[in-house]
Image (cartoon, rainbow, N blue to C red):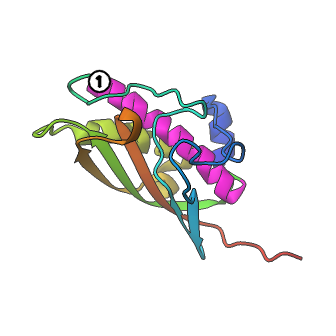
Amino acid sequence: MTSPEARVRELGLEIPDYSDPPFGIRYGRMKPFHRIGSLIELAGLTPENRAGDRLHPGVVSVDVTVEEGYAAARLTAVHTLGMIRYALGSLDNVVSLSRALCFVVCPPGFEDLHLVSNGATDLFLDVFGEDAGSVGRASIGATSLSRNNCFELWLSLECAPETPAA
């Protein structure tokens, strides 16, 4: 398997840099990630670029098609790759993805949450491969998310051990 960083280049993905300006500038003070040994817990990410432009805001199946929701989830996964780089320095330091909590804004009774969430998890498989990129996932219907985003992702992952400073 090609390394995740090489796969990103092959796929032509534009990964955002989360080191400047600081994460959370529009949402108040928050911690972008938390590391506990080899476990990384990322803060929630959305299909919103660094300038604040949102991809497909609204309610899936009302304002946003399932296909547009999939695209928003995929873009959120690209943003998540940027946060992983910020936390670890390189996507090559990911051992395995662990858990994805996918929030989809939708009306009551909407049953195709998984079709939207696939946008994120399909991208992770493309970048990390079947072993490291397969993730346990929950797709949860929500009535609203910050700034009218249609999708939000919380990701947990296992990373390579930190090397002690010399």
Report the predominant secondary structure element of the magenta stretch: helix
**Residue 120 percent location from the top left of the image:** 42, 41
**Residue 116 percent location from the top left of the image:** 31, 36
- In front: 33, or 81? 33
Q: Quadrant of the C terminus?
A: bottom right
Quarter occupied by residue 152: top left
Q: Residue 1, can we see it? A: no
Q: Residue furthest left?
A: 109
The reply, left or right, for residue 122 in relation to residue 157 is left
Element type where label 1 sits in the image: loop
Amino acid bearing label 1:
Val
- For residue 34, above or below residue 4: below
- In front: 145, or 99? 145
Within the magenta stretch, is there residue 72? yes
Quarter occupied by residue 154: bottom left
Q: Residue at x 39, y 55 (%)?
A: 100
In magenta, the rendered stretch is 65-89
Q: Which residue is mark 1?
A: 64
**Residue 83 percent location from the top left of the image:** 60, 49
Q: Residue at x 47, y 28 (%)?
A: 54
Q: Residue at x 32, y 25 (%)?
A: 67
Q: Residue at x 54, y 31 (%)?
A: 52
- For residue 28, above or below residue 104: below
